[in-house]
Image (tube, rainbow, N blue to C red):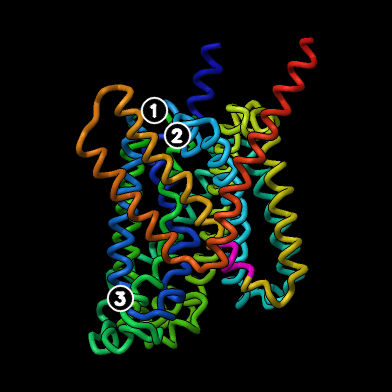
Amino acid sequence: MASDGKASDAKKLGMIGATFLIISSLAGSGVIALPQQLAFTGSITLISFILVTIGALFLTLVYVRAGERFDDPSPTALATYISPLLGAQCGFFYVYGNLISNVSILIAGLGYLAMFIPQLNNPIFLGITIITLIWVFAALSLRGVGIIAQVVSVTVTLLLISVVLTSLFGWLEFSPGQFKENWNVSGLNEGSAIMGGFAVLIFSYVGVESVATNAAQIKNPHKVVPIATIIGFMVVAVFYILSTTVMEGMFTAKEIQNAPASFALSMEKITSSSYVGSAVSLVMSIACIASFIVWGLNSVSAAKTSADNGFLPKAYSKVNRHGIPHIGLIINAVIMTVVEVILMLMGSNIAEAFNISVTISVLLLLFPYFWSGIALLKKDVVDNKITAGDLAIVLLSSVFILAAFASADYDELLIVIASALIIPGIYVVLMNLHVVSADSKSS
């Protein structure tokens, strides 16, 4: 038995692996997409960036504190600590919100490969490639977290090299006049323009809970989870802001808008080499696709937590000899395949479907984030350790979450609000049916 325990510990992530886990979750598709998407609003999004980063920092601190106080600091477990009903709702939102986002991440990653493989511009070819990758990555994940950490560490390191070089050497090409000219190209008033940048920025910070969600795969989680979470967030936040800001002074807004691989554009200008630009585009696309593996692990770990509490099918609770919920991985792969088939059938509307799916997935994930903060306050009350620090963290993270909802479109909010009302109702009906069934069997 002792040897089994050592083998199990050997497959778990230490401080470095856990830090790379959160960096990869944040810096995958998020940093790749940021410059181009923010360019449609302008360099005024620097204000948006600062505000959202402050809010995301307090949300990160929620999981730092939860990692210290809870054995399982994942969003679904924290919501369950408050109420089984909230646990059911948040488990559903977190798992399936991530699955929708996962498909979008693969679409984004393969989109950057289109310059090398033009056939990817065809929705059918793109869809078949995505479905193939879904199943290949599911198979890789079955072997445990070790191989995932290796793939992620290499690709994220390569991605960060391009981001760091742009953040540092891009200032040699920076023009204050160009930055001023790009200030607000959206046509909106400044207040609306600042809020207009919130949605994509919030999406870039989704993943601050990735280490907490995978606490079972971390060595000494009470120590490692808080430290890795805050280090990973700070690294990504600094280079997010530096890299996107410097690019607004390197190119016109139109140039960035038309550049699907923005960092390839910046590195090509810094090095005066088109070959470097092509290499960066390739690295960025691989890193973006690799982040899909991390999110796949996050989703199935969260699903297991919900299943253990009776909120999702028990099949999610079954694990293989590597400690991975193998049946859950297969279920999720099937669901993502169905989502991608739907996107394929939409044909020319696939780009619009991508944007909508990202926004909806983010809004769904905000529910577990909000209840995670409330769980921390409940823990303070139960343990009679109420602190001003925890109150401030939860209050400011909640303001950040409400601002995210305020930045969404009416139709997107309607879909999410409907889900928030319907899911608890379905849970109550199913639980009542379960009770009735159990009573009939006992009688």
Residue 227: image x %, image y %?
31, 39
Q: Residue at x 51, y 59 (%)?
A: 287
Magenta region: which residues?
353-358
Q: Secondary structure at mark 2?
A: helix
Q: Tell me the kind of residue under disc 1.
A: Phe
Taking the image as shown, residue 11 lies to the left or right of residue 339, namely left
Of pointers 2 and 1, the one earlier in the residue sequence: 1
Q: State the image coordinates of residue 396 (x, y, percent, origin top left).
A: 29, 50
> How far apart are the alpha carbons under marks 3 and 2?
39 Å
Residue position marked by numbered label 1 in the rendering = 70
How many numbered marks does the figure carry? 3
**Residue 179 lies in quadrant:** bottom left
Q: Say which amino acid is labelled 2.
A: Leu
Q: In the rendered structure, which disc, 1 or 3, sits on the residue that comes first in sequence?
A: 1
Q: Horizontal and vertical percent for residue 65?
A: 31, 36
Residue where numbered disc 3 is placed: 246
Disc 2 target residue: 78
Q: Main secondary structure of the magenta part?
A: helix
* Alpha carbons under labels 2 and 1: distance apart: 8 Å
Q: Nearer the viewer, residue 376 or 435?
A: 435
Asked if the residues shown at circle 1 and circle 3 are in contact, with their CB atoms under 8 angstroms apart, the answer is no
Q: Is residue 276 visible?
A: no
